[in-house]
Image (cartoon, coloured by chain):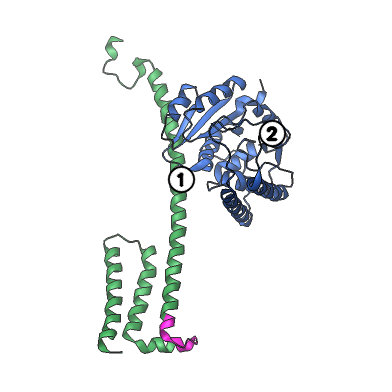
Amino acid sequence: MHAALDRTLIVMPALNEEASVADVVREVYEKLPGVKCLVVDDGSTDNTIAEARSAGADVARLPFNLGVGGAMRVGFKYAVNNGYDNVIQIDSDGQHDPSGVIKLLEALEVTDLAIGARFAGEGDYTVRGPRKWAMRVLSVTISWVAGVKLTDTTSGFRASGPRAVRLFAEHYPAEYLGDTIESLVIAARSGLRIQQVAVSMRPRAGGTPSHNPWKAATYLGRATMALTIALLRPRLPDPEPGVAVV
Amino acid sequence: MNLASYLFGIVTALITLFIVIELLRRRRLRERHAIYWLVAGTISLIFGIFPQLLVFAAGLVGIAVPTNLVFFVSIFVLFFVCIQHSSELTALETQTRVLAEENALQEMRLRELEEVVRRMPPAIGVDTSSGADS
């Protein structure tokens, strides 16, 4: 068992994931003994809450859908208020393998934010066409801002150390794409160290990534706008330790 | 300009002002949102009563057709109010979102607390009326 696990909070944003959430929670407890698992229900209309509780997770229920960003803010605030040092985000659809958490936690010993990346040599997940180009543009720009090579900036499999948790509990972006792109920009510009860790990812349980070129173009447009606005915003100071978040 | 169109301008401005003040009086409109409409209504009333002022003002800024000044100022005010509304909407959305987050966290605390209370022995529980037989 990894020593940091009992100071680590696993946060799983879940929107209508009744089919997979219980299995993912069980797998987390099985592979990561001692960890605490918080499922943030993002306004689901199905049985997600009951399924997650039956598997032994704590569930925070948002009264309506806020998106991944809003769900993660709940997780970060919970971590700060209950004394957890690290927050690890895992998708509740089962595409992230919980064994990757150990690698992310090891990375947190020398860095503030560890991104589990799909294209860093492991796994068989592929993206093609315009969506790939869009992700390439994002990677290059954010790598430049962060000062470290990042290849998978939209990965939802990431670990935040104590500095990142304090920063994100107050300033985690809630807009579309804010949880991936803008959060990296905020972290980098607040002086946090970011590192990429190779993890394998499983194909998504439901549905495949879209290869519609129009959707890819829209995605690139919105991502570029999110990135530009994130860069135009004032820098946020690195928050002091020990300050409670209201 | 005949008397009818002269009165038409004044009456329209008065109706606008009356509606805004009435909404303010019934607390259906807050001062900070009403101020632009009050200013706009007052300006249109002044120009309605003294149309020569409009010609004078248009001449000052070099606009050949005075009505164009009216259109310009009107569009500017509407544009400004729209942006202000978008900004207020953003603020409201942020507040709602934070409340939802807080609500989720409080609900968790309440749930944990209820769990603790349920596990308490009856003697020190809240309900003391049935404590005699335990």
Residue nearest the observer in this picture, B133 or B81: B81
The Cα–Cα distance between marks 1 and 2, rounded to whole angstroms, is 30 Å
Residue interval drawn in magenta: B57-69
Disc 2 secondary structure class? helix
Residue flagged by tag 2: what amino acid is it? Leu
Estimate the x, y position of residue B40 in percent, counting from the top left: 37, 74
Q: Is residue B63 magenta?
A: yes
The colour assigned to chain A within the rendered structure: blue
Estimate the x, y position of residue A73 in percent, counting from the top left: 53, 40
Taking the spot 69% from the left edge, 33% from the top edge, the residue there is: A108
> Which chain is displayed in green in the rendered image?
B
Which of the 4 image quarters holds residue A92? Answer: top right
Where does label 1 land, which residue?
B97
Q: Residues within 10 Å of mark 2 (few under 14, many from 20)?
A: many
Disc 1 secondary structure class? helix
Q: Are the numbered discs 1 and 2 placed on the same chain, yes or no?
A: no
Q: Residues within 10 Å of mark 1 (few under 14, many from 20)?
A: many
Q: Residue at the far top: name it.
A: B133
Q: What secondary structure is the stretch in magenta mostly built from?
A: helix
Residue nearest the observer in this picture, A214 or B100: A214
Where does label 2 land, which residue?
A108
Count of numbered badges drawn on the protein: 2
Residue flagged by tag 1: what amino acid is it? Arg
Estimate the x, y position of residue B42 in percent, counting from the top left: 34, 76
Which of the 4 image quarters holds residue B50? Answer: bottom left
**Is residue A192 visible in the rendered structure shown here?**
yes
